[in-house]
Amino acid sequence: MKQVYDYIIVGGGSSGCVAAARLVTDGKARVLVLEGGHGHRHPMLDMPPGIFKMIYGSKFMRYHQTVPQEHLDGRVHDIPQGNVLGGGSSVNAQVYMRGVPSDYEEWHELLRGGNDYPGWSWDDVLPHFRGMEGNNRLQNDLHSSAGPLLVSDPGHVNEVSRWFVQSVQALGLPYNHDFNGPSQRGVGFYQFMNRNGKRSSAAYAFLGPLEGNPDLEVKLNARVSRIEIADGVAVGVTYRDAKGREHQAFADREVIVSAGSLVTPQLLMLSGIGPADHLAAHGISCIADLPGVGANLIDHPEVPITALANGPYGYYLQGEGWRMLANGLQFKIFGSGPITSAGVEAGAFVNPVDPDGTPSIQAFCVPIVYLDRGAPGLVENSYGFTVTTVVTKPKSRGTVQLRSADPNDMPLVSPNLLKHPDDMQTMIAGQKYFLRAFHEEPLAGRVKRIAIPAPDDTSDAAIAAHCRRFVKTNFHPSGTCRMGPDGDKMAVLDARLRVRGIEHLRVCDLSAMPNINSGNTNAPAMMLGSRCAEFALQEASA
């Protein structure tokens, strides 16, 4: 039997879940969501600290390995992406961050033009953020307590996180009670997308209430291999189920691609949409020559500072099973304790060069010795704490290209983290700033020694070498199918998220971003899903 829907959404990640929910709820449309990964219901995914157990070696993650990065001395590193319904919102550290108004004002000016320009200013996107948010503390012009996405203060705060906040205040950075408030600048505690120790993913928040609705069909382990295009119109998709059987589904209105910044450009290219010469090299007929597909890869680079503790401070994941058991019992019986925390409780936004200027560095305090599996391990397993510094508005740009015409092959990913010299200089300044925090009380009294970077040489050259050795993704790849104004040859999408040159085809994930926002990207991904549904429904009713 021919499968026909109003809309087909390729990818059930953060953006796709929101778009599907709005199309079904507001548009009364029949929607098929094709998710290549697994279901999202799993105890380790639901509990906040599960990320540290699931991020590597889990079926719920798909591991994209970069090509050798010559500017990082040939290093290869992983970029894990969600392989599960809910996408990043089902596997991330749950930090709720929107970015700052100037991020969206920048988009607005860049994309301005045309009679049907929808607007991308802060005033245009804020209603979407507020409409989704159900905050447990804030209710004002910037926040709502009524939305389905549950946003909460941390259920438990480790003493190390409190010491970090106090020590950074000792450097002169003010306390900030709301990083999504009037100003990002300051140090404080993040809010998270969870409630009472359970994750509030896009799958739970937006698709959960629609279970049993006949207008929504979600297929798991359904990996799309090609968008079907007839006479310049997207009419459906070809996909394979978990047993490898091939199927086709058709859309009367639109196909919406929401497969993420690494897979969305791959899928477009496999379907004949992308740089003509690159497609020809892989034997793919070009339907729409869009050289920007796979270009403009942006990610937030992250570099750790790690200290070993002189006492039982923080979380020691390598031992003390009795303590973990006690924490589990406390969570099970009382719904409280360390397991209600995602671990990344505290952070900061600062400009280390101009303390009163726009923040250029975001920091996360993690009360464990935490390193990417691709980084050389520490000599000593111990209690300790890690502060990661992140460049908020990186200038480096990378690429996503086809490895082959086989949809089962992973794409070639080159993120070029810290390749732009300005990014490296910003990161060096951030590292030096937060190294000072380890020497301020009350944190200083709990440090046995700084493990990385080497404390005996904090010259720019030494810190740069440390950055090249340890830099990794902050899990925020973006921009590979970016929006742009008419006349921009590298713009894959117009300001309504429509793929140029192909009708009835839209993209609504982080690949659409013309530039990355300042801070975590999961909430902006959901905003893009909400706007995509808004645009699609406007056109359907026109």
Image (tube, rainbow, N blue to C red):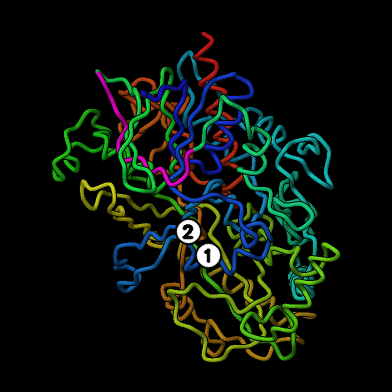
Vertical side of 256 occupied by 509: above or below:
below
Q: Does residue 345 appear left or right of residue 39 in this picture?
A: right
Residue at 51% over, 27% down: 31
Q: Earlier in the sequence, mark 2 or mark 1?
A: 1
- Magenta span contains residue 220: yes
Vertical side of 317 occupied by 529: above or below:
above
Q: Residue furthest top?
A: 542
The amino acid type of the residue labelled 2 equals: Met
Q: Which residues are magenta?
A: 219-230
The amino acid type of the residue labelled 1 equals: Ile
Residue 462 position in % (x across, y down): 46, 81
Residue at 44% over, 81% down: 376
Tag 2 and tag 1, C-beta contact below 8 Å: yes
Q: Secondary structure at mark 2?
A: strand
**Toward the viewer: 422 or 273?**
273
Classified by dominant secondary structure, the portion drawn in magenta counts as strand
Q: Which residue is mark 2?
A: 61
Residue at 29% over, 28% down: 228
Q: Taking the image as drawn, is residue 471 in sight?
A: yes
Q: Secondary structure at mark 1?
A: loop
Residue 255 position in % (x across, y down): 41, 27
Looking at the rendering, which quadrant does residue 284 occupy? Answer: top left
Q: Does residue 354 appear left or right of residue 154 in this picture?
A: left
Looking at the rendering, which quadrant does residue 412 occupy? Answer: bottom left
User: Alpha carbon of mark 2 to alpha carbon of mark 1: how far?
Assistant: 7 Å
Q: Does residue 233 appear left or right of residue 350 in this picture?
A: left
Q: Which residue is mark 1?
A: 55
- Magenta span contains residue 104: no
